[in-house]
Image (spheres, rainbow, N blue to C red):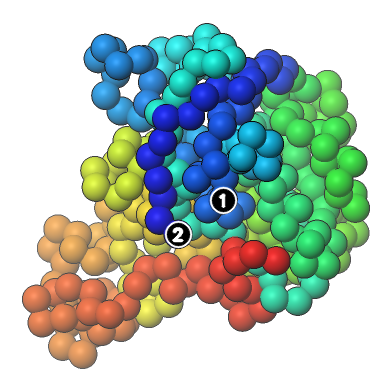
Amino acid sequence: MAPVQVRGTVLTVRRVDAYHAITVVAPAVAERFRPGQFLTVAVGGPHAATLLRRAFSIYGVRPDHGGTVEFVFAALGAGTQWLARRRARDTLDITGPLGRPFPIPREPANCLLIGGGYGSAPLFALADRLGARGCRVDFLLGAASVDRVFGALTARRTGRTAVITTDDGSLGTRGMVTDVLSQVIHEARTDVIYACGPMPMLREVTATAAKYDIPVFASVEEAMACGIGVCMTCVLPARGSDGVTRMVRSCVDGPVFRGDAVRWDDIGTIPFDALGAPGWRPKTGGAGFGSGSAGSDGSAGSAEPHNAMGHEPLEAGSAG
């Protein structure tokens, strides 16, 4: 179903260690939500000069009050600090759910969910959906310090196993999630990995998983402005199933991508061989520097960049 824009009443605002969580009454958003999708919030009030919305992963939805949506954030800038000052019964202008959700296994599988900081927020609704499908869920969460690990208790309560790492050793194992990833993969007999967190973490998770031929579905943390695919602020290079690199929009083509489709080392640039890059020219019977077809005007024809998101035993995040 298409996203909706609503004015929702704030139900609760709570502090969760280093983060804040807001629950908003928004039945139309809640009923459309699938794990991995996000919402955008107008900040600053109706008379503020802050024009751009802020994008947040949806932590969870509940049937209370007809349907509520909760999101988690760190109050770092003017917009999020304004959000942190909201109180119950205030109203927020939100749009959602947006983006492509996590794909769900068609058959029960061993699923490893990896989160960095409050990037773990979208993984808990996913864990519920995976559990309903009969999958076994293991968690691997990491952050700089204990107050920045989001959802450790929930992970321990809902996951088959939960491994926690912190850079300073204040909770769990000292180090980063990638330091223990290989061991966790072996012990959990992982079939598929879902991850959300900083880009360097996602890059390393993808590289490690590739050694074991394990697919990774990564929810990228890319700066967004419009959230609906218009402004092109959140583009990153990704390879399609035809082998052609395209600049895809995280907000509409993602935020969930196949890890091995994203060109992690080229994020922030336009690779020379990307479709439409300066100097790029279509080849007869091929597309630019890659394989695959292109239209006579150099367009991508019918090939879509997110074809590479597919994985044979997985389906789009449909209801379990």
Left-right relation of 101 to 272: right
Give percent across and percent down for residue 236: 36, 52
Q: Is residue 205 above or below residue 145?
A: below
Q: How many marks?
A: 2
The quarter of the picture where residue 172 lies is: top right
Q: Which mark is residue 31?
A: 1
Name the residue carrying label 2: 1
Residue 73 visible: no
Dot 2 or dot 1: first in sequence order is 2
Q: Position of residue 150 (x, y in %)?
A: 72, 30
Q: CA distance from mark 2 to mark 1?
A: 9 Å
State the quadrant of the C terminus. Answer: bottom right
Q: What's under tag 1, amino acid-wise?
A: Glu
Q: Residue furthest left?
A: 297
- Which residue sits at x=38%, y=40%? 5
Report x, y in % for residue 245. Answer: 33, 66
User: Is residue 278 visible to the viewer in this orientation of the structure?
Assistant: yes
**Would you say 157 lies left or right of 54 here?**
right
Q: Inspect the image, locate mark 2, and give the three-letter code of the amino acid beneath it.
A: Met
The residue at the point 47 percent across, 72 percent down is 308
Q: Which mark is residue 40?
A: none
Asked whether 163 or 230 is in front, the reply is 230
Q: Does dot 1 land on a helix, a strand or a loop?
A: helix
Q: Residue furthest top?
A: 85
Give residue 55's position: percent from left, percent from top: 44, 35
Question: Which residue ends up furthest to the front in the rendered image?
Answer: 66
- CB within 8 Å, label 2 to label 1: yes
From what the image shows, is residue 182 above or below residue 300? above
**Secondary element at image label 2:** loop
